[in-house]
Amino acid sequence: MGRLTIYKDNHADVTAVSNIFIDEYMKDANDAQLKVYLYLLRMTGADLPTGISDLADKFNHTEKDVLRALKYWEKNGLLALEYGEDKNLSGIRLLEPCRLGAEKKTEAGINSKINFKINAKTKTDTEPNPYTKPSYTLDQLKAFQSDEETSQLLFIVEQYIGKTLSPSEIKTVFFLSDRLGFSVDLIDYLVQYCLERGKKDFRYIEKVAVSWAQQNITTPEQAEKQAYKYDRIVYDIMKALGKSSAPTAKEVDFINRWTKVFGYGMDVISVACERTVLGTDKHRFEYADSILNSWFRAGVRHAGDISGADESFKRTKPVQPRTGVSNKFNQFTQNSYDFDALEKELLRN
């Protein structure tokens, strides 16, 4: 790509950052997005040339990373991208930040140009909806498929889906990358996320992708966090263990182990959670994990298998002398799992 000249009429050795940007936009942006936007502001004040490759080299990002950052800020209304007849990026318009949810009324403040040019003006209602898939030409699709990284991505998606992608499905993947600005890693995670929920239909995949884009999700880590926010089984498990807060990363690891490695549904997990709550008020995830791990090793697959595992456990466990008053609760906990011994072991670790 050609070099870009950024300039404005007056020059000072400072870079002004809008308080609205700091208050409203900065908290949701990732590292690359912040660096690109702030550097664009910096270059408008310095009257220095720059380009996509310069930005990439400056921050040790790829040119695709820079373009994704530009599309992110365009989607959030802080700049607009312009394209020449050759479909290459030819201009950038810096837009005045406004309070989120407020209508943009003026363009005062930023009036700078990159050639790649930046000249402030508002996005109009006639500009295309960034969340609508455009009608890509055959040449655009060929160019998309010829990229080595894209070719590998399409191959991976085909392996996930179990078939060769149709032209329509390739257009959807192109849309995710081109318009929504999804990275290869995020598209990979998106397809896996949908397949785990039994969804192979690309209309469903596209719908989820648009939802993520509207929530400013740009990384697999952000998508995973959001997925757990709305994943019913996660919160069912948290509730069953007497937890009202959002799960920690360690707790999510336990839940992943139970649901994905062990393959258990709530019919089995809820029984383990019930026994855990009856047995202890500390280290509940660890206790539940010990129960589910023992069931998994014993071949438990469904709730109906649990009673058999309990009977097998009773037969193999050495008889321990009992002290104190015997009652139903005492008998239940001792015949199932030695929580006192487990707690001591956990506290030593």
Image (cartoon, rainbow, N blue to C red):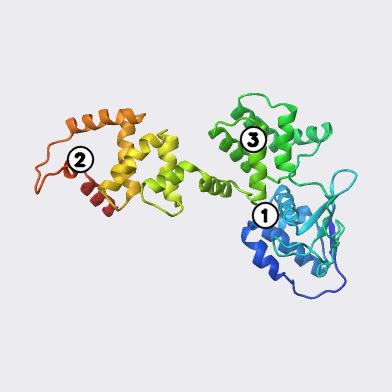
Residue 289 image position (x, y, % from top left):
34, 42
Element under disc 3: helix
The Cα atoms of the two marked residues, 1 and 3, are separated by: 35 Å
Q: Amino acid at mark 3?
A: Tyr
Front residue of 154/76: it is 76
Q: Amino acid at mark 2?
A: Phe
Residue at the extreme right of the image, as rendered: 85
Splitting the image into 4 quarters, where does residue 158 fall? top right
Residue at point 53% right, 49% down?
A: 225
Residue at point 83% right, 52% down?
A: 125
Residue 332 numbered mark, or none: 2
Residue 204 numbered mark, or none: 3
Residue 110 image position (x, y, % from top left):
81, 67
Residue at the extreme bottom of the image, as rendered: 12
The Cα atoms of the two marked residues, 2 and 1, are separated by: 60 Å
Please rate how many residues cluster around mark 1, counting C-alpha atoms within 10 Å: few if below 14, some from 14 to 19, many from 20.
few
Residue 153 numbered mark, or none: none
Is 28 placed above or below 188 here? below
Residue at the extreme top of the image, as rendered: 163
Residue at point 71% right, 64% down?
A: 38
Residue at label 1? 60
Any part of residue 299 in sight: no
